[in-house]
Amino acid sequence: MAQNQGSEATTDAPFPLSRSLPDRFARGWLRPAFLATSPSPSRSPSRSPSTSLFVVLAFLLLLLLLPVPPVRGLCTAPLRVGAMRAAGRPTAALRRSPRAAKRGLSASPGKTDPPRVRPVPITPSPKRPRRRGTAFSETTIPAPGPVENHELELTTRMLASIRPEQGFVDLGVPPVELRPSNTLTNGQCFHWRVVHPEKAGPAAPTASASAWGTHDAKEWVGVLRLPLFGAHESAVVVVRELPETTLYRPLVVTRGGDLGRGTEPGLEGELHRALAEYFQLGVPLEGLYEEWSEACPRLSVIAGCLPGVRILQQDPWECLASFICSSNNNIPRITKILASIRREYGRPLLRIPSESGSEYCWLYSFPSLEELSARATEKDLRETCGMGYRAGYILETMKLLGDDARGGEAYLHQTLRHDTTDPGEVQDLLCEFRGVGRKVADCVALFSLNQDDAVPVDTHVWNIAIRDYDPEGVLRTTVRSLTASNYKKVGEVFRGRFPNRAGWAHSLLFVAELPSFRGLLPDDLANEMETFQKEEKARKKEEREQTKTKAKLKTKQKPA
C-alpha cells in the first residue's frame, strides 16, 4: 500500500530527474497538448491539458538554455544563417570550429567559399534559313548500302569487271558442232543464267540478236560441278557464242573445296578438258545430223534450222536432284527451286555487283550429297526452297543413296555411268529412288550417265511419235496411257528409226517443239505443229467426255 502511494507520488511529480528522457516520453509527461486532450489509461485522469503544455514549453526553454554548443547551434543556426544572408555577409564562418575561427582557418582545409557568379543572359542564335526541298537542314541522312537481289539482271559489263586480266579462251568448235543458244536453254540443265548485252543508251533495245539472229542471248554464266584434278570441284564459267566459234572465260575455280586464284599450274588445260567432256565435244555432231536426216526427212528440215544441239554430260548427283524437282513442273519454276537450294545449302563463290553499285547477287555452288544431307530438313526444302511435296522425295533419295550398299555419289559416277551399259537396267536402278519414275530416270541417264539411247517419253514425245512415225495409227489406237509397256513401246519407235544415239535425235525433235524455238522453223512446219497440237487437245477432251458419259450410264444401269 505504501509502495503504491510512493509510485503515485513519483508519477505526479512534474520533472522526476531520476528517470531518463525516453522514459518520460513513454509515460506521457512530455506529450503535446493536442495529444493530451484524451487521458491515457496509464496516466492519472486528474492531469489537465494546461499542465502538459507547460511541460513541453519548459522542455524547449531548457534546450535553449543548456550550455552545450552543438545543441545551441542546432537550434539557432537557421536563424543566424538567414540573418547573415540578409545582411550580405559570408556564411563560411558558420562552418568553422571555435579554434579554427581564432586562427582564421576553415573547418574544411583547402576549401573556401566559391565566388559569386552572376548569371550571363543567353541570347538566342540567329535562325538559319531552311533549304527548300529538304526536310532536315542540319542532319544529312547517309545513303543506304547495296542490297542483295537474287534475280539481278546480269550484263556483260558487270562480268567484265571481274578478273579483267582473264580473257576468253576458244573452245575451237564450229557452229555445226555446238551452239550454246540451242543447247543451254532447252530444259536439259538448269544452272545457266543469261548475260544481257551492254546497252548503248536509254533508248537502246533490251535484247540483241544472237549469232543466228533469233535468240536474245549470246552469253551465259553458270556454276558447274566438274571433275578437276581427280575431284569434284565447282567452277564459275562464262560462255559466249560467236558466229564462227564458242568462247569461255573462267571466273572462279575451287581447289579442294576452297576458292582458288585461277593461277594454279595446269588449271587452264584441266578446265579445257573438263569443259570438252561437259559438252561431249568428242562426239562428231555433223555426221550424226546427216545420218538422222537420211532416216527422217522432217528431221532434215529441223537440223538445218537448229544446228549444234548437243547433249550435255552433267554431274550425276546434281542432275538427279534437278529432275526430281521437275516432276509436274515447268522450266522457270524448276530453275527457281534449284537456285534456292544453292543459296540455302551451297557455298558462296562469286559476288557480282550491279553497274550502279546499288545491288549485287551471289553465285553459289550446288551442295554435295553430304552437305545437303547434313543440313536440309523437309520443312526448309518444302517452304524455303519451294519444293512442296517433292521435299520428301529428295530426302528419301539422299538416305537411300548414302547407305552402305551404294556408298553415296560414287554409286552414280562409277556403277551407273561406267559399269552398267544396258539402258533398261539403268532405268530400273534409278527408279528405286523415291520420286524417280521412268521419264525422270531416262532424263538422268541421258544427260549424265552416258546412256545415249535413253529416250525420255512424255506427252510431247508421245505426240511426235503418233504424228511422224505412226502412219498406220497403231500407237494412236492402242496406247491410251503411258504404262510401263506403252512407255517402252514409244521409246522403241525412236530407237528403231535412229539406231545411233536415239536419245540425241529425240532431243533435237523435242527442242523444235518448244514454243521458244518454234520461230526458227519454216512457217509451214510451225503451222503444222500448232494445228496438230490443237487437234490433239480436242481429241483428248472428247475422249474424256466420252469416258465421263460411259461412267454415268453405268451408274444409272446399276440396280437400286
Image: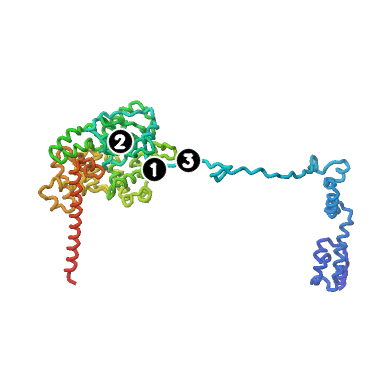
The Cα atoms of the two marked residues, 2 and 1, are separated by 22 Å
Could you say where residue 131 lies in the image, as x and y percent from the top left?
57, 43
- Foreground residue, 492 or 130? 130
Disc with the residue nearer the chain's start (3 vs 2): 3
- Say which amino acid is labelled 3: Gly
- Say which amino acid is labelled 1: His
Q: Which residue is drawn at the image coordinates 42% and 39% (left, top)?
A: 360
- Say which amino acid is labelled 2: Lys
The answer, for residue 144, to whether it is visible in the render is yes
The numbered dot on residue 150 is 1
Q: Quadrant of the C terminus?
A: bottom left
Mark 3 touching mark 1, by CB under 8 A?
no
Could you say where residue 78 lies in the image, as x and y percent from the top left?
83, 53
Which residue has dot 2 on it? 218
User: What is the crowding at mark 1: few (fewer than 14 residues within 10 Å), some, or many (at least 20)?
Assistant: some
Q: SS for tag 2?
A: loop
The numbered dot on residue 145 is 3
